Amino acid sequence: MPVVDDYLHLLPYWDKLSETEKDFVKANSAIHSYDKDRVIQGYSDSCLGMIYVIKGSIRVLMISEEGREITLFRLNSGDSCILSAACVLSQITCDTQMIAAENIEIVVVNPQAYSSLMNKNLEVRCFTYELATERFSTVVFVLQQIIFARFDQRLAGFLLEYYDRTGLNKLKMTQEAIAVEVNTAREVVARMLKQFASDGLIEMNRGSITFKDIEGLRMLI
């Protein structure tokens, strides 16, 4: 079982804390583990706290009254998130859900402790507001893409983001899973992938996509 003390030094603001503050964080932190597809935080849940992803991936999404899901962004290993501690910042009014996209382990600093730390330490406060601004900028970008961008641009952007992040030329993901990520129906993804394959940009295999022309994909966006 992981020990939280082994991971606290990875927190982006750790070196900005005094020894007393470090002891305070140690006393108010824990490691949480979630299996794939588990809801980490839902709309009706209490404030989880400030999180740091040790391993795995988290999908952050919104769900409309009609049940439509909109993926806002993902949190990967090394990422922090303030939306899970919305009660810390009264300015945050965006209701989101967080779901484990794969088995994950996260460090959680409880919200009361993080709020106290933020109020006493200017560096932590600045980090918090910068992170909140970054996340909300991402949300605005995603909504702009859904409203204004052509779907071939959105899908090419998704494929390129994976390639640039991992360096791998093969994406192992079903069309249904891709549809969830790019906020559309599976049939729409299937049609566009067939078009990409016909244009020589990708090669489609069962459960995977091989990138054949990265520069060609970049020209779409």
Image (spheres, rainbow, N blue to C red):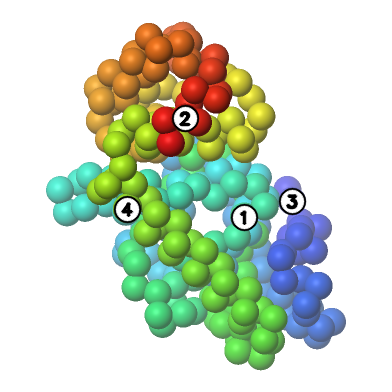
Residue at image mark 2: 219
Residue 112 vs residue 174: left or right?
A: right
Foreground pick, 209 / 120 = 209
Q: Amino acid at mark 3?
A: Pro
Quarter where residue 94 is shown? bottom left
Whole-percent x, y for residue 53 in the image: 62, 53
Q: How many angstroms separate mark 1 from mark 3 (CA)?
A: 18 Å
Q: What crowding class fits label 3: few (fewer than 14 Cα within 10 Å), some (14-19), or many (20 or more)?
A: few
Q: How many angstroms separate mark 3 from mark 4 (CA)?
A: 37 Å
Q: Residue at x 24, y 22 (%)?
A: 187
Q: Secondary structure at mark 1?
A: loop
Foreground pick, 179 / 55 = 179
Residue at image mark 3: 2
Q: Residue at x 76, y 64 (%)?
A: 8
Q: Residue at x 27, y 47 (%)?
A: 148
User: Which residue extends farthest bottom?
Assistant: 120
Dot placed on the residue nearer the N-terminal end, 3 or 4 = 3
Q: Amino acid at mark 2?
A: Met
Q: Secondary structure at mark 2?
A: helix
Residue at image mark 4: 143
Q: How many angstroms separate mark 1 from mark 2 (CA)?
A: 29 Å
Dot placed on the residue nearer the N-terminal end, 1 or 2 = 1
Foreground pick, 65 / 103 = 65
Is label 2 or label 3 in front? 2
Q: Is residue 104 visible?
A: no
Residue at image mark 1: 79
Is label 1 or label 2 in front? 2
Dot placed on the residue nearer the N-terminal end, 2 or 4 = 4
Dot placed on the residue nearer the N-terminal end, 4 or 1 = 1
